[in-house]
Image: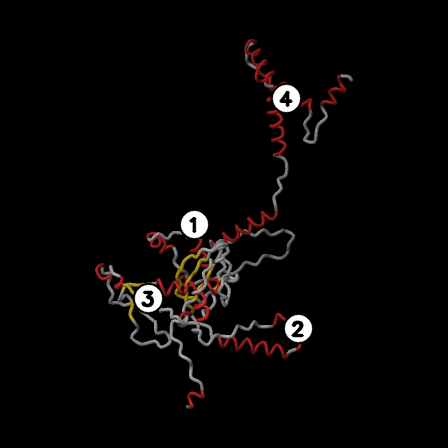
Amino acid sequence: MTIEDATSYLKRPNKDGNSTYNHLVNIIEHILIQQEGKNIKKGQEIINNEFDNIESISKRIKTQNSSSTNNDQTIFFNEEETKDIQNHTDKVLTLFGKKPVQVVNVDEEEKVEEKEEIVIDPTKVVDIISNVQLLKSVGIDLGDHEWNLLQYSCIELVKQHSKITNPRFFGKIYGVENNYFIVETELEEYPDLKAEREAAIAANAENAENEENEENEENKVIIPPEIDEKMEQPGSGCNKRVYYVCQNLYESQWSMLPWLTPDAIKKSRECHTLFTGNLKSIVSGRISFPGNENLFLRCIIERILCSTIISPINYYKKPEEENLDDPFALECNEEFSSINKEEHHELSGWVHSRGHLRLEGRQNKYIKPETDEENKE
């Protein structure tokens, strides 16, 4: 083999463009650079040291060449992970009132329509931040980050359910899979459940008469279940207040809990189970509960409220005009000045400010309506 053949053989590059010839040249240049400017004696010492470390020099030069080559390579990302990160970023931006960045291809002719901003009433938004210091003083703290998320999430609650009034943050209930953030509200106008059920039945009857609609299941209206005659109607008793639940503050999807029935409250007293964090899950245990976890959660909330909400005596008073529909109606007593240490130091200085939950599962005693035959007698 001639010198020319040997040189051409050593100059053959690999897949990264590096060759043995160039690598040897780089090693020699490295040794000469280290020796430059030194005297012969010191240079001799350097040469001996470089000879002992020639393997490490070769490895260092290979690493430098490979790193410079990798910088030119294309980096590939997992598309599913990228979409998840983008969706999470969009949710956070939307929650904090900022518009997500929308990437539109140049080839697409359709323009992205901007959603109109919903104007909300600030009095319907729960003021979380102003109550944080008070809650912290009694040992209740969710962390500054979660408090801020909850405040912005309450704004989304008003956008989704604009008919609410007098909102109040009830609390956070921990579950096995998810947690529940709960807000207590009232409604500007309460629904008539009997009228809604009759309207749904009538709508389905009209659709059944039309042959075209019989085959189309989408036109069928879901008929609400039969209403328990002992149930307190929305806007009175246990159903005076409405509760909304959110499981993920980033998504801020608020769900309304169902109306209470006496049977559900009585059965909930016999159920002893943990919340799963899924509103649609079945309530496990030896008792057959008449509903899913959303109804069970609503029963637990009502039992907590009727047992734990107290106020200083004489802080509230009954209105001058008696309300027959709501015998537990109260109004603030203007004559109440401040808490007296001597009077309110004892338990006798405090009273329950919510209606008592009776054994029958109602706040108001059930009185069976008289029938026409009883009226004739």
Q: Taking 283 as reference, is 53 above or below it? A: above
Q: Secondary structure at mark 3?
A: loop
Q: Residue at x 22, y 60 (%)?
A: 340
How far apart, in angstroms, are the residues tagged by discs 1 and 4?
55 Å
How far apart, in angstroms, are the residues tagged by discs 3 and 2?
54 Å
Which kind of residue does numbered mark 4 sit on? Asn
Q: Crowdedness of circle 3 by 10 Å Cα count: few (<14), some, many (20+)?
A: many
What's the mark number on residue 145? 1
Residue corresponding to mark 4: 26
N-terminal of the pair, mark 1 or mark 4, is 4
Q: Quadrant of the C terminus?
A: bottom left
Camera-nearest label, 1 or 4: 1
Which kind of residue does numbered mark 1 sit on? His
N-terminal of the pair, mark 3 or mark 2, is 2
In the rendered image, residue 37, in percent from the top left (x then y), is placed at: 55, 14
What's the mark number on residue 295? none
Residue corresponding to mark 3: 353
